[in-house]
Image (spheres, grey):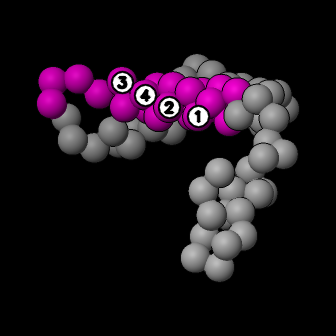
Amino acid sequence: MVFGLAGENIYEYYLSTTPSRHMTFIFNLFVWCTIFNLINARKINDELNSFKGLFNNASFLMIFVVITFGQFIIC
């Protein structure tokens, strides 16, 4: 293991991290990247502001809220 300048193990805290906690973080990161992509994929033809008109589409907002709320419940 890697030791710090004082000689103590600097990765001692992370030895107790289980693979399931690591995979939960990866899953959470994947879902948030998907949510970010969901917002950015609304605009085409090189439009710069991806947040313009975000609250005008009720079905988009419902899907966004369900995915976000579901992510909080799952994790």
Q: Can residue 44 be seen in this view?
A: yes
Gap between marks 1 and 2 measured at Cα: 6 Å
Q: Residue 33 carries which label?
A: 2
**Which residue in the structure is indicated by mark 4?**
37
Residue at 19% across, 35% down: 47
Given the image, on which type of amino acid does mark 4 rest?
Asn
Residue located at (29% from left, 27% from top): 43
Residue 13 % position (x, y): 78, 57
Question: How far, Cα to Cα, is label 4 from label 3?
Answer: 6 Å
Residue 51, numbered circle: none
Give the amino acid at mark 1. Answer: Leu
User: In front here: 46 or 3?
Assistant: 3
Q: Where in the figure is residue 75, as x and y percent of width and height?
A: 80, 33
Task: Find residue 1 and report its horizontal and vertical position in percent.
Answer: 65, 51
Q: Are the residues tagged 4 and 1 within 8 Å (C-beta)? A: no
Task: Reply yes or no: does residue 41 show up in magenta.
Answer: yes
Question: Which residue range is magenta in the image?
Answer: 23-46
Residue tagged by mark 3?
A: 41
Reading the image, the residue beneath label 1 is: 29
Q: Return the residue found at the far left.
A: 46
Do labels 1 and 2 touch, CB within 8 Å? yes
Asked where in the image residue 65 lies, by quadrant, the reply is top right
Question: Is any part of residue 58 visible from this angle?
Answer: no
Magenta stretch secondary structure, dominant:
helix
Dot 2 and dot 4 residues touching (CB under 8 Å): yes
* Camera-nearest label, 4 or 3: 4
Q: Could you tell me which secondary element the residue under label 3 belongs to?
A: loop
Q: How far apart are marks 3 and 2 (CA)?
A: 12 Å
Inspect the image, locate mark 3, and give the three-letter code of the amino acid beneath it.
Ala
State how many labels appear. Answer: 4
Q: Earlier in the sequence, mark 3 or mark 2?
A: 2
Tell me how far mark 4 sits from mark 1, CA to CA: 12 Å
